[in-house]
């Protein structure tokens, strides 16, 4: 029996065992918010990758014992306890991989900083193993791509332990209107560990929640617009959306090639920098990575200096700040802290904020989604039951109670109606995106004011999860860098009634080293991250 057939036959059964429920309707319904849970702290909570490595080097920990620790914590918090629903599937080979890495460490020493470190990856990132890659959809349950995604190959080479697949907003939240972030037909509703009735944002919901709740050391998400940065901010962690092309997209279920990228999610800037260095570099299967040969770095930690804000010119993107008074107070405090650290603020600077940009972006995404997804599905081979976007639409129509109960597939239908990428409507929309976001947007402001970065709050605090009418969270500051294909980093900035909010640094293409330096300096000056308390809801004591 081949690997694909094995996973297809065992997928439903293993999923039911993991989640403790039947693999269809019981999973699709999130159920009422769990009561607040007192979670017993562990000596391993909040430890950094460097600290874990030191303990393994000293013989106080091993890859096997650390893997067992995270598996037990997932059992306690994800399956039971507050039932976070951050993890879709565990890697049945995780302990075997960990044992082999322990043996290698004893014989030859560690490969690098990720040797024996547990990583969760978003369920739209392909693995050719005993796990499925489904984008959270029941339509792809049991689907095993013909090879690992390039970034997965890189992580395996670095010695990481792939712990499992993280839940996500189904199809990376590009399926229907009035969707609820963090919900997938396969995994149900992911919960925010800071207040269980609050949304985790998305689409990298499970990756963010797992990192925040210490279910893994680090995680990998993907972003088209906000899908790494927003859930990182909602869950009080660091997220990096790299320049498009720094990390290969080959083997990742796509939305749109002009904006898609994977990126690291971690509790500290240093850990995120370590993970970024392990994943980036040229890949012949992704032409966008060709330029990365001149920019990729295997060790981004060398740019992390606490005094990096001194003398930096920081543009303040006021148009992206929103109007929430509590958020604005935190943002002003963050700006004051940067000034105390020696930064020179240029306040305000012009940032891309134009309805025409958002309209053009959506047009581009619909065209590229159809073309890119059809290409991905075709790559799964003749045995794959889903070969086109049209097949997925028909699957959802045949399974409305499991897939369409909470929201529809309007974006699928609009994308399916689009023609080829040679059509004038697509080419004009793409040109508009690049002009407004790059030439007249980020590039113009940074050139005019000689900026190192632009800053703005990533987004507001988490909104209440509402499966009836969908997401209510205010739009954040992620769109300019996303549409431009430029990098952005979010760092915890503080809390509003116990709910985390983040500050984003973004800049021109390939500016990851400088952005990391600034984000690290801000992180070290503020130490704003607070671990979650797994409350049922926000309370008056905040």
Image: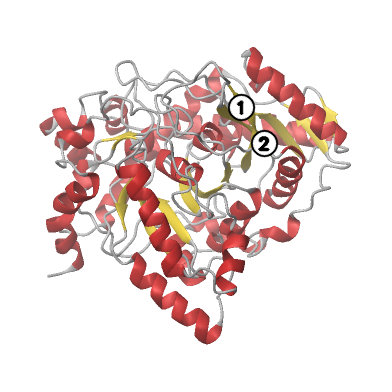
- Dividing the picture into quadrants, the one containing residue 392 is top left
Query: Disc 1 designates what residue?
Result: 495
Residue shown at 20% from the left, 66% from the top: 3
Image quadrant holding the C terminus, namely top right
- Dividing the picture into quadrants, the one containing residue 431 is top right
- Visible in this render: residue 466? yes
Residue shown at 81% from the left, 23% from the top: 347
Residue shown at 25% from the left, 53% from the top: 378
Marks 2,1: beta carbons within 8 A: yes
Q: Position of residue 1 (x, y in %)?
A: 12, 70
| Element on which disc 2 rests | loop
Furthest residue in direction bottom, as rendered: 107
Tell me if 341 is positioned left or right of 388 in this view: right
- Visible in this render: residue 285? no
Q: CA distance from mark 2 to mark 1?
A: 8 Å
Instruction: Report the number of discs.
Output: 2
Query: Disc 2 designates what residue?
Result: 528
**Relative vertical location of residue 237 with respect to residue 192 in this rendering, above or below:** below
Tell me if 164 is positioned left or right of 459 in this view: left
The colour scheme is secondary structure
**Relative vertical location of residue 338 with respect to residue 289 in this rendering, above or below:** above
Q: Nearer the viewer, residue 95 or 172?
A: 95
| Element on which disc 1 rests | strand
Q: Nearer the viewer, residue 378 or 131?
A: 131
**Relative vertical location of residue 188 with respect to residue 71 in this rendering, above or below:** above
Q: Earlier in the sequence, mark 2 or mark 1?
A: 1
Q: Nearer the viewer, residue 67 or 221?
A: 67
Query: How many neighbours does mark 2 have within 10 angstroms: few (below 14), some (14-19), or many (20 or more)?
Result: some
Q: Position of residue 398 (x, y in %)?
A: 10, 33
Q: Position of residue 64 (x, y in %)?
A: 41, 69
Q: Position of residue 121 (x, y in %)?
A: 41, 52
Disc marking residue 87:
none
């Amino acid at each position: 029996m081949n690997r694909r057939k094995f996973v297809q036959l065992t997928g439903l059964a293993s999923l039911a065992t993991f989640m403790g429920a039947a693999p269809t309707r019981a999973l699709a319904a999130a159920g009422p918010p769990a009561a607040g849970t007192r979670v017993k702290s562990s000596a391993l909570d909040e430890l950094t990758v460097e600290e874990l490595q030191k303990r393994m080097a000293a013989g106080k920990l091993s890859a096997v014992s650390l893997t067992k620790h995270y598996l037990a914590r997932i059992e306690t918090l994800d399956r039971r306890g507050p039932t976070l629903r951050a993890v879709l599937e565990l890697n049945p080979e995780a302990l075997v991989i960990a044992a082999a890495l322990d043996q290698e460490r004893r014989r030859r020493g560690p490969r690098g900083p990720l040797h024996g470190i547990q990583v969760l990856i978003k369920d739209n990132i392909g693995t050719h193993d005993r796990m499925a890659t489904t984008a959270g959809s029941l339509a792809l349950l049991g689907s095993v791509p013909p090879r690992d995604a390039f970034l997965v190959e890189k992580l395996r080479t670095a010695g990481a332990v792939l712990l499992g697949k993280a839940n996500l907003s189904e199809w990376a939240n590009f399926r229907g209107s009035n969707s609820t972030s963090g919900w997938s037909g396969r995994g149900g509703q992911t919960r925010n560990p800071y207040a269980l009735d609050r949304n985790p944002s998305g689409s990298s919901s499970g990756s963010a929640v797992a990192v925040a709740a210490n279910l893994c050391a680090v995680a990998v998400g993907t972003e088209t617009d906000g899908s790494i940065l927003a859930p990182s901010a909602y869950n009080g962690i660091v997220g990096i959306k790299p320049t498009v092309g720094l990390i290969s997209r080959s083997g990742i279920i796509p939305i749109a090639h002009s904006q898609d990228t994977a990126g690291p999610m971690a509790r500290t800037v240093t850990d995120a920098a370590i993970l970024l260095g392990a994943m980036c570099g040229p890949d012949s299967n992704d032409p966008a990575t060709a330029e990365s040969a001149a920019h990729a770095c295997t060790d981004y930690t060398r740019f992390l200096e606490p005094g990096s804000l001194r003398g930096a010119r920081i543009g303040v993107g006021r148009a992206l700040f929103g109007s929430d008074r509590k958020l604005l107070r935190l943002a002003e405090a963050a700006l004051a802290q940067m000034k105390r650290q020696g930064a020179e603020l240029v306040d305000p600077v012009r940032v891309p904020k134009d309805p025409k940009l958002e309209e053009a972006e959506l047009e581009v995404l619909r065209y590229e989604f159809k073309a890119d997804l059809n290409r991905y599905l075709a790559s799964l081979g003749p045995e794959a039951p889903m070969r086109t976007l049209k097949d997925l639409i028909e699957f959802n129509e045949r399974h409305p109670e499991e897939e369409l109960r909470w929201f529809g597939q309007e974006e699928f239908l609009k994308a399916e109606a689009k023609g080829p990428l040679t059509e004038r409507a697509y080419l004009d929309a793409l040109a508009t995106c690049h002009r407004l976001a790059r030439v007249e947007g980020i590039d113009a402001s940074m050139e005019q004011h000689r900026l190192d970065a632009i800053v703005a709050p990533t987004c507001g605090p988490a909104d209440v999860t509402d499966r009836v009418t969908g997401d209510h969270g205010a739009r954040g500051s992620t769109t300019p860098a996303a549409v431009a294909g430029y990098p952005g980093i979010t760092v915890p900035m503080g809390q509003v009634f116990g709910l985390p909010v983040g500050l984003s640094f973004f800049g021109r293409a390939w500016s990851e080293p400088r952005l990391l330096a600034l984000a690290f300096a801000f992180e070290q000056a503020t130490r704003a991250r607070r671990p979650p308390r797994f409350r049922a809801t926000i309370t008056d004591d905040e």
